[in-house]
Amino acid sequence: MNLTKLTTILLILASINLSAQSEKHLNEEIQSSEYKPGKIVTLKDTIKCFIMDRENDYYFNNNVKYKLQISDSKSLKIKSRDILHLELDGNDPFDRLPYGPLSYLMVKLVDGDVKLYETAIDGFDDYGTYSNGGMNTTNNPNLDRFFLVRESLIIKVSRRMSSADIKKIFPDNNEFLKQFEKMDFQQFLKNIKELVINYNNSIKNKGNENK
């Protein structure tokens, strides 16, 4: 074999090896991009890690995948029911809240004096179970999947909510309470996040005025 042919073969082999390494590196980058820095809290541990980034309903009822280091080739798993708190960069945090005889992992949509949570499980009844046994698979907002929390008080947002429930959660501002009482349930659901944010801001502003 002359020198020219040998050189050509070596160049071809080097090109194939470089291509394979580039493809492997690309696959690793794609895989790593699915994981974001975060924190998982259980009864026993606080795990700072990299958590698989998915739609919110993934975290409610699945084995959540995570890596201790982003470069790890294999991921670890934790059952959703064992998670008390989960943080993922760029996402709303998750907390486990009691409701009825059970507890549920929920997304904290609004923080403040009044907190607003949402779960992907729909159709809760007054005993903490859910009627259809499944996950919310529609975009219909008319579902019992929002929860209002003030200190230790947790109230499910539903048509069964009474004025007394509203006054327990929003007790500090009579004018603001009137706005809630004038709305029908569909309006309330449609605007619930904005309403809770505005309420918390009104309490904050009132506190600043009294200083």
Image (tube, rainbow, N blue to C red):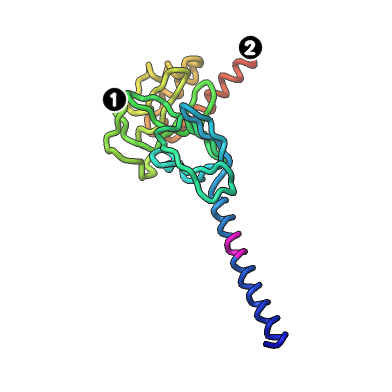
Indicate the amino acid at tag 2: Asn
Between marks 1 and 2 in the image, the one whose residue lies nearer the viewer? 1
Q: Position of residue 42 (x, y in %)?
A: 47, 30
Tell me if 185 is positioned left or right of 116 in this view: left
Q: Which mark is residue 210?
A: 2
Q: Which mark is residue 127?
A: 1
Work out whether residue 175 can be spotted. Answer: yes
Q: Nearer the viewer, residue 186 or 37?
A: 37
Outermost residue, left side: 131
Q: Position of residue 11 (x, y in %)?
A: 68, 77
Q: Position of residue 46 (x, y in %)?
A: 53, 30
Q: Secondary structure at mark 2?
A: loop
Q: Relative to residue 139, is residue 209 depicted above or below?
A: above
Cα distance in 3D space between marks 1 and 2:
41 Å
Residue depicted at 56% across the width and 48% down the height: 72
Tell me if 96 is positioned left or right of 10 in this view: left
- Range of residues picked out in magenta: 21-25
Quadrant location, the C terminus:
top right
Q: Main secondary structure of the magenta part?
A: helix
